[in-house]
Amino acid sequence: MKKRLKITLWVLGILAVLIVVIFIFVGNLLNKVTEEMDSLTINSKAFEEKLHTVDDGTYVGEYYVKGLLGAKIEITIANNKISNIVILDHKNGKGKKAEVIIDDIKNAQSLNVDMITGATYSSKFILKATENSLVK
């Protein structure tokens, strides 16, 4: 009976250590994602300049943070205007509602649009992916 108790305590100890390591790893990863997102800038001016000089066609851009979150978009340009934007991939956690930002981009013909409340990071993913489609 004592041997079984020792084994059980040993297994529980190992599980406790593993749980702590996982929490530390996830916490570090979340901190890195937050730092990157807080420092991320969207260069609307460069995008607009490229929009007025790029050939008509379809372009793909993407932006991912640590491979976990991000977006990939396809933008269609006709007569130096955005005619369509399609989200090809959006790893978003709870930020799905940010996808409506593509309508704002098309209407403004610019990346200088408001973030979607409650989905700021996902809004930034989509904006940066859109920027990257033309500004490489």
Image (tube, rainbow, N blue to C red):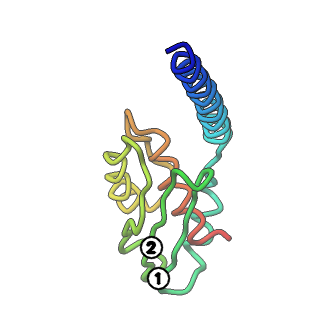
Where residue 8 appears, as percent x and y from the top left, is: 52, 21
Q: How many marks?
A: 2
Q: Are marks 1 and 2 in contact (CB under 8 Å)?
A: yes
Disc 2 marks which residue? 75
Q: Residue at x 42, y 71 (%)?
A: 82
Q: In terms of depth relative to the viewer, which is nearer, 32 or 117? A: 32
Position of residue 89 in the picture relative to residue 15 (left or right): left
- The quadrant in which residue 85 appears is bottom left
Where residue 135 appears, as percent x and y from the top left, is: 64, 68
Position of residue 102 in the picture relative to residue 60 (left or right): left
Q: Residue at x 38, y 62 (%)?
A: 106
Q: In the current view of this chain or complex, which residue is farthest to the front?
A: 1
- Mark 2 lies on a secondary structure that is strand
**In this view of the protein, can residue 111 be seen by the observer?**
no
Q: In terms of depth relative to the viewer, which is nearer, 37 or 7? A: 7
Q: Amino acid at mark 1?
A: Thr
Q: In terms of depth relative to the viewer, which is nearer, 135 or 3? A: 3
Disc 1 marks which residue? 58
**In this view of the protein, can residue 60 be seen by the observer?**
yes
Q: In the current view of this chain or complex, which residue is farthest to the top?
A: 2
Q: CA distance from mark 1 to mark 2?
A: 6 Å
Q: Residue at x 40, y 39 (%)?
A: 119
- The quadrant in which residue 118 appears is top left
- Mark 1 lies on a secondary structure that is strand
Position of residue 28 in the picture relative to residue 8 (left or right): right
Where residue 97 appears, as percent x and y from the top left, is: 31, 45
Return the disc, 1 or 2, that comes first in the chain's sequence.
Answer: 1
